[in-house]
Amino acid sequence: MKIITVADTHIKSGSIVKQLPGKLVGLIKDADLVIHAGDFVTKQAYDELCGICRLEAVHGNMDEESLKALLPERKVIEIEGRRIGIVHEAALSLQDTTGAWYMAKEMDVDIMVFGHIHKPVIEGDDTFLICPGSPTAPRLSEPSAIELVIEDGTILGKVITLEGKRCGALESIGNFDKKL
């Protein structure tokens, strides 16, 4: 099964399909399942995504109240015998995923998909932490999503780098050669 994980799309108005990178829209349409780890922002964005793919999702801290009422804060699904936890806020820091490890243990999952930090993460051996980053508002990274493939109980994952605006901090790295 091919799963595309995404989070932190932060679509404040208009069409989510028109504002996401084209490559990601194609991957979403071709996936067996899409997992969104919160921060759609608008119910319109959620509804539109539901119309083009099989979607499992939780709400994020920036989502409208109508989405918070509709979607859970945490969710566990099972795919091919593997338990997948979905939550928006698991790790509160770009550098420290300790909280996400504890949450994965608490939820008794093989894969913990989370958002909030806007930077892609794939960590683990027996249990995996997956943060797809953000396709529209990355932090210390390029725009991204993560593709997971689960076959016969084996889990493979890869970060997919997308076109679009990169983190401003990465843009400023090239400016260090300027004189002070």
Image: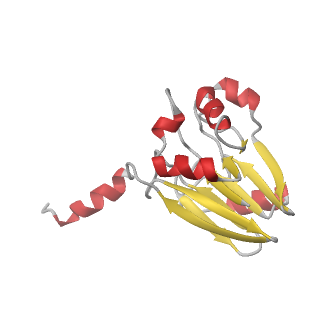
Residue 26 place in picture, x, y as percent: 54, 49
Please give left or right for residue 151 compared with residue 4 in the image.
right
Q: Can you say which quadrant of the picture contains the C terminus?
A: bottom left
Task: Name which quarter of the figure residue 111 lies in.
Answer: bottom right
Q: How is the image coloured?
A: secondary structure
Q: Residue at x 35, y 55 (%)?
A: 169
Q: Quadrant of the N terminus?
A: bottom right
Residue 100's spot in the image, x, y percent?
70, 58
Of residues 108 and 84, the one nearer the viewer is 84
138 versus 72 height, above or below: below
Quarter-of-image position of residue 65: top right
The one of 44 and 93 positioned closer to us in this rendering? 44
Is residue 6 something one can see in this rendering?
A: no
101 left or right of 38 in image:
right
Where, by quadrant of the figure, is residue 57 drawn?
Answer: top right
The count of marks equals 0
Q: Residue furthest left?
A: 179
What residue appears at the point 71 percent right and 53 percent down from the top-left corner? 32
- 179 with respect to 29 (left or right): left
Residue 23 seen anywhere in this rendered image of the structure: yes
Up-down relation of residue 129 to residue 48 (above or below): below
Q: Residue furthest top?
A: 66
Relative image position of residue 9 (x, y in whole percent): 54, 41
Q: Nearer the viewer, residue 32 or 4?
A: 32
Q: Position of residue 3 (x, y in %)?
A: 68, 56
